[in-house]
Amino acid sequence: MERIKIAYAIDKETGQPVHISKADKSKKYLCIECKEELRPAQGKERAHHFKHKKNSQCNTSPETELHKLAKIIIEQNNEILLYEKVKFNYNKCDIEKQIRDIRPDVIIENNEGEKWIIEICVTHAIDEEKKKKIQEMQLNCIEIALDKDLYGKALNVIKNEVLQNPNNRTKIYPEDSPFPHNVEFNTKTGFNHKEKKSLFNFKTKYIICTLAAIGIGFFLHDLFVRKQWRKKWKKNFKKRYIK
């Protein structure tokens, strides 16, 4: 099986993705898929590309490379367009972190604890079972579809498709609104903290109302006791001093 002409690699020193057109032969590069060392082939006769060593067993594909490159791009940035005019700034990014029995491609989180799952589609869209589980757990999620023909194009083109293009997004959850709705979840359990917060608010209100009722009860009881005591005192006073 003939290997593909690899267009992207990771700069071993900086960890940044590099397009073959920007490669420097004096630097070391790693394969996005297998992390083995690559070297740039920049001859005059063939198209420029990165190549593995002869004994490498890596059989990466353009689809796999593009899928992993998209995740790296999200991880190394801090802002993404969820929908048209709706940007999400984040300061934390987890790649393929397990949530119960699903493993999202990317989970991003902002300072307020709001999280979004980003699924990357190059050849296969998110399957119905995974989609259903995401919806049942009420996890904010969008899917970004990338055309496999993007492979080989300049990195700024790929970055724009991943981070800025509003036309390749599909909303998985919530389905009723394109805007963030502050559903928060635990990345280990998938527990919906919005529901927990609502329950906490209900309990807090219940406790406050109960304490208020008890306080009012004591107040009314005190008034009643004082009133009865005054009646009894007046009655005794009249008997003793008023004839």
Image (tube, rainbow, N blue to C red):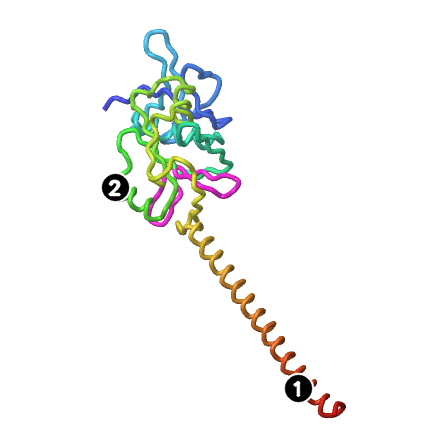
What is the span of residues highlighted in magenta in the rendered image?
97-117
In front of the other: 11 or 108: 108
Is residue 171 shown above or below 212? above
- Distance, label 1 to label 2, CA atoms, is 78 Å
- Residue 111 position within the rendered picture, expressed as x and y whole percent measured from the top left: 53, 40
- Residue 62 position within the rendered picture, expressed as x and y whole percent measured from the top left: 30, 24
Q: Is 82 situated left or right of 3 in this image? A: right
Is residue 44 shown above or below 175? above
- By secondary structure, the bulk of the magenta-drawn segment is best described as loop
Q: Is 232 situated left or right of 216 in this image? A: right
In front of the other: 23 or 106: 106
Is residue 196 shown above or below 135? below
- Residue 183 position within the rendered picture, expressed as x and y whole percent measured from the top left: 43, 45
SS category of the residue bearing label 2:
helix
The answer to which image quadrant residue 61 occupies is: top left
Total labels drawn: 2
Residue drawn at the location 52% of the way across and 63% of the way down = 209
What's the amino acid at mark 2? Glu
Label 2 belongs to which residue?
128
Label 1 belongs to which residue?
232
Mark 1 burial class by Cα count in 10 Å: few <14, some 14-19, many 20+:
few
What's the amino acid at mark 1? Lys
Whether residues under marks 1 and 2 lie with C-beta atoms below 8 angstroms apart, the answer is no
Residue drawn at the location 66% of the way across and 86% of the way down = 232
